[in-house]
């Protein structure tokens, strides 16, 4: 039964990424190794972020919520946008191809590094625990929050802002969406902390906010592509 629980959590977490790779057309471009390179870039960026955070920002432990400290820590996530831009700049092809390669490689690397070991160790435990189902669902929000998606959204935003021919009328909207993408986790964490939300309610709130951000980015992306086509 515990093996079945692990298999269920594993499939819920990983299969949507595999399906996205197959159905998005990336497999037709033999983009597997490009996604792997994006994943390696993710590891390098996360290492730099950890060293920076460990050096300049102490860990918050209980007591009064350190709003300023957590905001400064969230600002380090700008490095993710820089990393995504680096990955896309090294890939030739259409914008859609660059966005999908960068986003899927980045999100998959995050999934493996942040959830593979907890699922393997925890979901195979003696007792059933809903938190591993929540963890698996949350991994899909990572795909469909930036699939429509945290990292697809972030990659699309980076692609738009780095276009040399981007109309000035679009630039403020893109910068606003990028700001929201960077600080979304911080805002949600603060909201959950202040409102004392339960784990399922917090998961639903993250999904809703991510969906709204994704739809806004999609609408802006379509407008930019149509104007420049």
Image: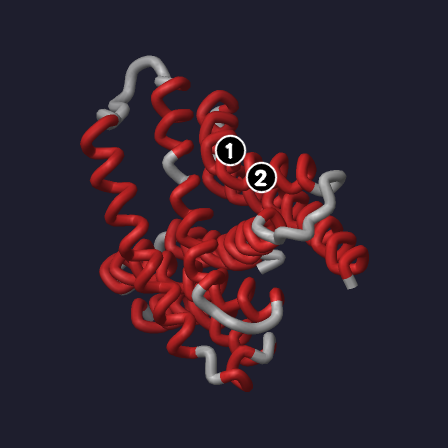
Q: In this picture, is 225 found above or below 37? A: above
Circle 1: element type: helix
Contact flag, marks 2 and 1 (Cβ < 8 Å): yes
Which is nearer the eye, 170 or 215? 170
Q: Quadrant of the N terminus?
A: bottom left
Looking at the image, can residue 205 be seen? yes
Of the numbered discs 2 and 1, the one sitting upstream in the chain is 1
Tag 2 residue: 205
Residue 163 image position (x, y, % from top left): 62, 53
Residue 198 image position (x, y, % from top left): 48, 35
Left or right, 30 with respect to 145, comes to left
Q: Quadrant of the C terminus?
A: bottom right
Q: Residue at x 55, y 63 (%)?
A: 99
Which is nearer the eye, 33 or 64? 33
Q: Residue at x 35, y 64 (%)?
A: 39
Which is nearer the eye, 100 or 171? 171
Circle 2: element type: helix
Tag 1 residue: 188
Q: Nearer the viewer, mark 2 or mark 1?
A: 1
**Mark drawn on residue 152:** none
Q: Label 2 to label 1, Cα distance in Å?
A: 8 Å
Q: Residue at x 61, y 65 (%)?
A: 95
Q: Classify residue 54 by image quadrant.
A: top left
Residue 110 image position (x, y, % from top left): 37, 57
Left or right, 166 with respect to 135, comes to right
Residue 119 image position (x, y, % from top left): 31, 60
Left or right, 176 with respect to 68, comes to right
């Amino acid at each position: 039964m515990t093996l079945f629980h692990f298999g269920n959590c594993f499939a819920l977490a990983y299969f949507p990424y595999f399906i996205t790779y197959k159905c998005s057309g990336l497999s037709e471009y033999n983009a597997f190794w490009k996604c792997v390179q994006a994943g390696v870039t993710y590891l390098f960026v996360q290492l730099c972020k950890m060293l920076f955070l460990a050096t300049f920002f102490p860990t918050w432990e209980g007591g009064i919520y350190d709003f300023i400290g957590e905001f400064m820590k969230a600002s380090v996530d700008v490095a993710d946008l820089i990393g995504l831009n680096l990955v896309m700049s090294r890939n030739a092809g259409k914008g859609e191809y660059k966005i999908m390669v960068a986003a899927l490689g980045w999100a998959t690397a995050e999934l493996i590094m942040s959830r593979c070991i907890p699922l393997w160790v925890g979901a195979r435990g003696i007792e059933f625990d809903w938190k591993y189902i929540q963890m698996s669902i949350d991994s899909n929000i990572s795909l469909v929050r930036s699939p429509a998606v945290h990292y697809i959204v972030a990659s699309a935003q980076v692609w738009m802002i780095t276009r040399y021919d981007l109309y000035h009328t679009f630039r403020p909207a893109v910068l606003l969406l990028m700001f929201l993408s960077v600080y979304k986790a911080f805002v949600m964490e603060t909201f959950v902390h202040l409102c004392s939300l339960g784990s399922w309610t917090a998961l639903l709130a993250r999904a809703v906010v991510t969906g709204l951000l994704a739809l806004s980015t999609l609408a802006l992306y379509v407008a930019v592509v149509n104007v420049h086509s």
